Amino acid sequence: MAPPRGGSSTPDASSELAQLRPVVDATVGIACGLFRGAAVAAGGAETTAAGRRLRVATKYRAEYLASRELPRGVDRPLQKGAVAAQPQQLPPLAAAANLKRITAGGDAGGCQRPVRGAASVDHEVQAVLDGLQGQQQKALAKRPKEPSRDLVLAAAARSSEAAGTLPPPPGQQIVRKRNYEPVKPEWHAPWKLTRVISGHIGWVRALAVEPGNAWFASGSVDRTIKIWDLASGTLKLTLTGHISPVRGLAVSARHPYLFSCGEDKQVKCWDLETNKVVRQYHGHLSGVYALSLHPVLDVLVTGGRDSVARVWDMRTKQQVHVLTGHKSTVSAVECQEADPQVITGSMDTTMKLWDLAAGKALTTLTHHKKSVRALALHPTEFGFASGGSDAIKQWRCPRGDFVQNFEGHTSIVNSLSVNTDGVLVSGGDDGSLRFWDWRSGHCFQEAATVVQPGSLDSEAGIFCSAFDRSGFRLLTGEADKTIKIWKEDDEATEESHPVDFRPSLGRRRS
């Protein structure tokens, strides 16, 4: 290949140019055609110094315009530990300076190639350089002062490069974190003990209040069921028939029936007009520990030591479903009108939400680390609480979404009850009572039961609890063989008993 006109070349340079000529002719032919016309492109690439300078200037201008379309930081080289090493590219101004050195007679590698160009071409190259600098200044002036989405994505790309990982796909780079804002608790009056009812000769394990709020029933380890007047606390009736401790009671709101279950594997239906057993439901293979009535259907659900919950037709005594899946004792059962219509808690640390029509589990909740001993449905809100050996947790139906923890009850929780005012009461195995605000999870009162004279200090446990229909009276069944009635303090005010609220992040941890 002949050297350029008006210049000279060494043999090495000539051989190098001879090898690159086909490539140069093919790649810059189109660019020359754009600026010099179709005749130049058809007749071959111009090999003069002026032509080379024009081609180089065109190439850098095209690269600069292409680089403007990329987000900031994308064209940066990968850092140490990146997935693939990329060659470092010069910024536009540095590339322009390099272009000026080439056109002045030196290439990027320092090889001197004296050339003589035309004055008109030099002016054209200088105009291109001035245009590059002006466009870059305009781009800098238009850059937003606040970080835009492109800048955030570019920063995420740079951080991922520094960490040696690829950036996540679009739509996953930015995750807005929701900060936990504690809910201010409502004020509730403190509760105080108003009456102690004695009569049982064994632990009181079950309580149920009649829908008319006139009387309540209690079941005991002494194998009896007693009916008490709620207003005066006097004994009205004693029902006998179980041969083992009574563990569950429920009074029907649609029929004059009282249902009971016990450790003798029996489930009984008592007619309150004749005070006799009219139906018995046979099927459990071991003691029955929990019982609940459906609020709308004539359906009874029981759970026990055989690790299953059984659904019974109240009228025909037929077993409708056997809800299997738990691996240990079913210790708590609750029914509600909407799905999930049946909720069970077990000693295997799990809770299950059931489809009553299909007889299958909808969801299994495994948040508890120890046995679940108590469940409580909120009377107006679509949610429930669970308690056991480790914690008290609040859930939202229908999917069983975790809401919050109730922190502060350190003993084993045997009973839970909630009223329409949003007061949740938990009773512990050591005789402790905790009163909680349902919405915020704040414990506004800590109380302890008083052991009756003649009882041991170890008999201070609370086994069951229930609010009356008004929600203003609380009944607790205890290990000292008594039933205690608690009421709100009518003389308390927000000034005399202010809310002592300290937010805790642990309430939101499952």
Image: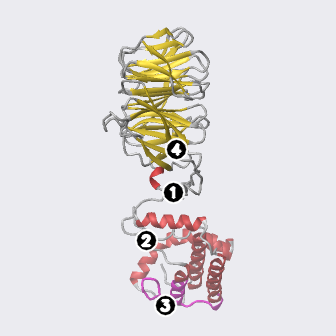
Amino acid at the residue labelled 2: Pro
Would you name the residue on which mark 3 appears?
114
Marks 2 and 3, how far apart in space? 29 Å
Question: Is residue 415 or residue 126 the one in the foreground?
Answer: 415
Above or below residue 241? Residue 442 is below
| Mark 4–mark 3 CB contact (< 8 Å) | no
In magenta segment, residue 299: no
- Point out residue 239 in the picture as x, y percentages from the top left corner: 46, 15
Q: Residue at x 57, y 42 (%)?
A: 422
Would you name the residue on which mark 1 appears?
500
Marks 1 and 4, how far apart in space? 16 Å
Question: Is residue 201 or residue 232 the one in the foreground?
Answer: 232
Question: Is residue 372 or residue 262 the one in the foreground?
Answer: 262
Q: Residue at x 60, y 64 (%)?
A: 149
Would you name the residue on which mark 4 appears?
191
Above or below residue 3? Residue 207 is above
Q: Earlier in the sequence, mark 4 or mark 3?
A: 3
Mark 2 nearby-residue class (10 Å; few <14, some 14–19, many ≥20): few
Instruction: Examine the rendering and report whether any part of residue 137 can be seen.
Output: yes
Q: Nearer the viewer, mark 2 or mark 3?
A: 2
Magenta highlight range: 96-120
Marks 4 and 3, how far apart in space? 101 Å
Q: Quadrant of residue 140?
A: bottom right
Instruction: Examine the rendering and report whether any part of residue 350 can be seen.
Output: no
Would you name the residue on which mark 2 appears?
87
Marks 2 and 1, how far apart in space? 63 Å
